Image (cartoon, grey):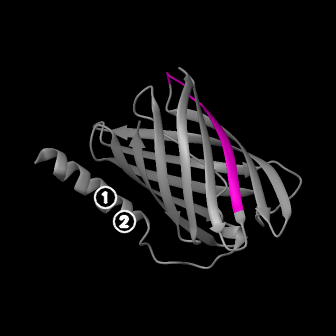
């Protein structure tokens, strides 16, 4: 009975990820940071949906004690084959709640491709080993300003549901365009 309840909760969380209301599909609403948090020293699968109409899939993996790697694919428009691919490295600091994220982004649309690099300092807080909050400042350091704003603020709130499952809510804010992008992800440790 316990296994059935655990799998039912996971199924409901997956459905919740894909039932958020659809928003406008603007490129400026694409989140430009793939923030990741791992509870243990293994890997994690993430299934997500954002208010801009993006479905995302990512795998996070510990590379070393102070480095996490993440590969993420976001489906923007499958009919026109618009995809966003992100490769992110998160450098951890064991003494302080400060980490540093470096990301390479590759956007493919209308048979054209765009790429940019972003960096972000992140401050993380853990409360009672069940809640995580992270706040960061994301900076697009590339010459191409594809997202209509060089600096974005982001926040993630995570609730650990079980030993291997968590649910996270993220918010990205672009102050230049006054756009808030909402993200929900189901995180399953492998």
Q: Residues within 10 Å of mark 1 (few under 14, many from 20)?
A: few
Part of the protein shown in magenta: 83-95
**SS for callout 2:** helix
**In terms of secondary structure, what is the magenta stretch mainly?**
strand
Q: Residue furthest front?
A: 79
Q: Position of residue 149 (x, y in %)?
A: 76, 63
Instruction: Decide whether residue 94 is among the magenta residues.
Output: yes
Residue identifier under label 1: 11
Say which of 137 and 62 sits in front: 62
Q: Position of residue 34 (x, y in %)?
A: 60, 48
Q: Considering only vertical position in the picture, is 68 above or below 113?
A: above
Q: Residue at x 36, y 66 (%)?
A: 16
Measure the C-alpha gap from mark 1 to mark 2. 6 Å
- Asked if marks 1 and 2 touch (Cβ < 8 Å), the reply is yes
Say which of 112 and 105 sits in front: 112
Instruction: Decide whether residue 17 is among the magenta residues.
Output: no
Horizontal side of residue 156 vs 68, given as left or right: left
Q: Position of residue 20 (x, y in %)?
A: 44, 72
Say which of 115 and 175 sits in front: 115
**SS for callout 1:** helix
Q: Residue 81's image quarter?
A: bottom right
Q: Residue at x 67, y 66 (%)?
A: 175
Residue identifier under label 2: 15
């Amino acid at each position: 009975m316990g296994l059935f309840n655990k799998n039912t909760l996971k199924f409901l969380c997956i459905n919740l990820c894909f039932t958020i209301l659809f928003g406008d599909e603007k490129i400026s609403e694409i989140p430009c940071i793939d923030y990741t948090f791992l509870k243990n020293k293994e890997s994690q699968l993430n299934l997500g949906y954002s208010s801009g109409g993006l479905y995302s899939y990512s795998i996070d993996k510990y590379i070393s004690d102070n480095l996490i790697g993440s590969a993420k694919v976001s489906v923007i428009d499958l009919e026109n084959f618009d995809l966003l691919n992100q490769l992110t490295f998160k450098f951890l600091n064991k003494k302080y709640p400060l980490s540093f994220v470096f990301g390479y982004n590759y956007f493919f649309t209308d048979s054209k491709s765009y790429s940019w690099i972003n960096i972000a300092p992140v401050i993380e807080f853990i409360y009672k080993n069940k809640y995580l909050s992270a706040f960061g400042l994301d900076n697009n350091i590339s010459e191409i300003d594809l997202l209509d704003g060089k600096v974005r603020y982001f926040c993630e709130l995570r609730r650990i549901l079980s030993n291997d499952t968590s649910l996270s809510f993220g918010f990205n804010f672009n102050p230049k365009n006054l756009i808030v992008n909402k993200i929900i992800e189901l995180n399953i440790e492998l």
